[in-house]
Amino acid sequence: MPLESIEHAIDALRHGRMVIVVDDEDRENEGDFICAAESITADQVEFMLKIGRGALCVPMAGEEAERLKLGPVVDDSRNTAPNKTAFLMAVDHIDAGTGVSADNRARTI
């Protein structure tokens, strides 16, 4: 798969498509599936979970996390992760049933 420009990736996201963003060798040296939360589908969630096989994360601005009252999993002063990843509490949408299915997770996102 060829590497594309940032503009191409942004256009793909605007049109509801998924992209892979690859970080640097001196960080995690991995690729992350990314799609726009506004248009995410259960099929996209299922693909990320089955093919990506990692944690499903939803990045957000600090103001949004505060509005939703989402606190950190680990206090910053005790965060020993190499990159100080700031994970917040896990949540489910009120109408998302068990929160386990791809449809439930897409609804939450």
Image: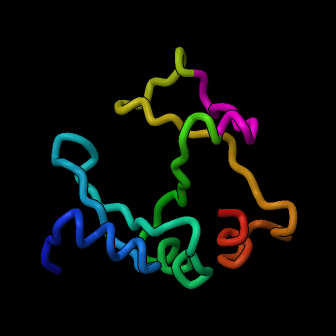
Q: Is 69 included in the stretch rendered in magenta? A: yes
Asked if residue 95 is positioned above or below residue 85 in the image, the reply reads below
Q: Which is the main secondary structure of the residues drawn in magenta?
A: loop
Looking at the image, which residue is at 17% across and 67% down? 5
Looking at the picture, how far across and down is residue 10, in whole percent? 32, 67
Asked if residue 32 is positioned above or below residue 28 in the image, the reply reads below
Q: Quadrant of residue 82?
A: top left
Residue at the far left in the pictured view: 2
Quadrant holding the C terminus = bottom right
Foreground pick, 81 / 22 = 22
Looking at the image, which residue is at 28% across and 47% down? 28
Looking at the picture, how far across and down is residue 21, in whole percent? 29, 61
Residue at the far top in the pictured view: 77
- Does residue 42 appear to the left or right of 24 in the view shown? right
Residue at the far bottom in the pictured view: 43
Looking at the picture, how far across and down is residue 12, in whole percent? 34, 76
Foreground pick, 75 / 67 = 67
- Does residue 2 appear to the left or right of 22 in the view shown? left
Looking at the picture, how far across and down is residue 22, in whole percent? 25, 59
Q: Quadrant of residue 102?
A: bottom right
Image: magenta residue range: 65-75
